[in-house]
Amino acid sequence: MLKHDEIPSFLHPYSLLRVMGGVILEHIKRLQKPFSILIDTFQELEKDTIDHMSQLCPQVRINSIGPLFMMGKFINSDIKGDIFEPASDCIEWLDTREPSSVVYISFGTVVHLKQEQIEEIAHGLLNSDLSYLWVKRPPTEGLFLEPHVLPRELKEKGKIVEWCPQEKVLAHPSVACFLSHCRWNSTMEALTSGVPMVCFPQWGDQVTNAVYIIDVFKTGVRLSHGETEDRIVPRKEVAERLLEASVGEKAVGLRENAQRWKEEAEAAVTSDGSSDRNFQEFVDKLVAVKATPKIIIGLLNHVFG
């Protein structure tokens, strides 16, 4: 049972993002029309949820075909790319760090934290004595947001970049944990790279994803309950959670769980894996009904997103 602050904020009646709730409900109403829904997850990770969805909508085939970014490994790299130019020296810098010694930090392209919270995260990093790689993009033009100011002494402990190749960073042996806002793409990339997460969700499906990361997948620790919490997380808590996910017995368990999901994900996208079979089944059905004039195909990022 999800609590109020664990339900996607766009489903709350007074949320600024409630218009998204209407869009989602409209998609649900259309579930009787499509013959297949494709979801960016894999059967082994969310079997119970997928089975429940199938029971609720027996007229629709639920096909888990993820992790989609792992499917991309079989695609020509010339046609792939980042929406921003990644820092070219990120991996080289990580090569100079000790194994499992670096905190990777990224809150995506949309989340913009308050200056006070950024300062607490920065001092939490300093107090943890861990190295870090922090992706910090400047504020989006037109939003009238002030750029964050970081303590000078923080620069001695790590590296700050505007973007980096996240898949490669998470796969690097020097990365100990991932401080993240818990959007689904980042969640899947961490999960399938065997990296524990420090969950700092803000809004949307991030709060629900955090519940699954912590309580179901058991690959992360909680730093925030999202915007409904309405507080600045203090540096003491930041340092404690970073250390909990990076060193000690708890960190070992989180990493072992993440490694297990990594292996399951790799198996799912290989030939005759669950995602490979589901996608082939969808293609076969699509070919079989190619003469049908109206076909609606739903592609969901996640069962909640």
Image (cartoon, rainbow, N blue to C red):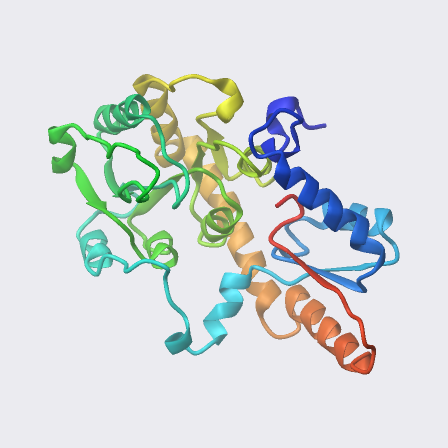
Asked whether, in this view, residue 22 is left or right of residue 17, the answer is right
Report the residue that reaches farthest toward the front: 142
Instruction: From the top left corner, tell me how far across and down residue 299 is, in percent.
Output: 66, 59
Report the residue that reaches farthest toward the right: 59
Q: Please tell me how many numbered marks the rendered image carries.
A: 0
Instruction: From the top left corner, tell me how far across and down residue 189 is, in percent.
Output: 46, 53
Task: Classify residue 12 by image quadrant.
Answer: top right
Instruction: From the top left corner, tell me how far across and down residue 103 is, in percent.
Output: 30, 40
Residue drawn at x 74%, y 47% as measured from the top left: 26
* Front-most of residues 31 and 196: 31
Task: State the quadrant of the N terminus.
Answer: top right
Residue drawn at x 82%, y 52% as measured from the top left: 54
Q: Is residue 105 above or below residue 77?
A: above
Instruction: From the top left corner, tell me how far across and down residue 264 is, in percent.
Output: 58, 57
Residue drawn at x 80%, y 54% as measured from the top left: 31
* Front-most of residues 264 and 182: 182
Q: Is residue 64 above or below residue 101?
A: below
Asked whether, in this view, residue 39 is left or right of residue 250, the answer is right
Residue drawn at x 19%, y 44% as measured from the top left: 159
